[in-house]
Amino acid sequence: MTRIQLSLPDELAKAASQAGLLTPEAMQAMLREKLRAESAEQLKAAWANAGDTGASPADEQMIAEAIRKVRAERKAA
């Protein structure tokens, strides 16, 4: 398992700690959710770029990879 050290402003660290957001479980959940959101945004961008003429092979590959990532993350969660 990888260890990460964060530097946060004191007020933010205190508020996050009081809200229970600095636990390993909470940090993992937040990171997974952000990764899912990023994958969804990439999928939306690829879809928007495809236009009415259909997706290029590169777009189709990007869409398929984004779908695989989201599905794998949902299984892991």
Image (spheres, grey):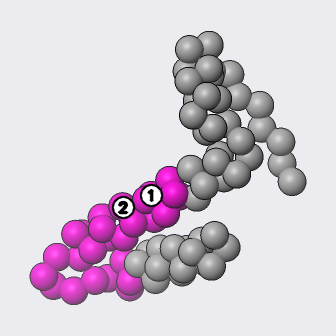
Q: Camera-side residue: 46 or 72?
A: 72
**Residue that carries the numbered disc 2 in the rendered image:** 41
Label 2: few (<14), some or many (≥20) within 10 Å? few
Q: Position of residue 7 (x, y in %)?
A: 68, 22
**Dot 2 lies on which element?**
helix
Q: Please, which residue is most extreme toward the top here?
A: 10
Is 51 a magenta residue? yes
Q: Main secondary structure of the magenta part?
A: helix
Can residue 9 be spotted in the picture? no
Depicted 73 relative to depicted 35: above or below: below
* Highlighted range, magenta: 33-60
Can residue 3 be spotted in the picture? yes
**Residue that carries the numbered disc 1 in the rendered image:** 38
Q: Position of residue 6 (x, y in %)?
A: 70, 28
**Quadrant, the C terminus:** bottom right
Q: Are marks 1 and 2 in contact (CB under 8 Å)?
A: yes
Q: Position of residue 67 (x, y in %)?
A: 47, 79
Residue lying at 17% horizontally and 76% vertically, measured from the top left: 51
**Quadrant, the N terminus:** bottom right
Report the side of 52 relative to 25 (left or right): left
Depicted 27 relative to depicted 9: above or below: below
Q: Position of residue 13 (x, y in %)?
A: 62, 22
Determine which quarter of the picture holds residue 37: bottom left
Looking at the rendered structure, the kind of residue marked 2 is: Glu
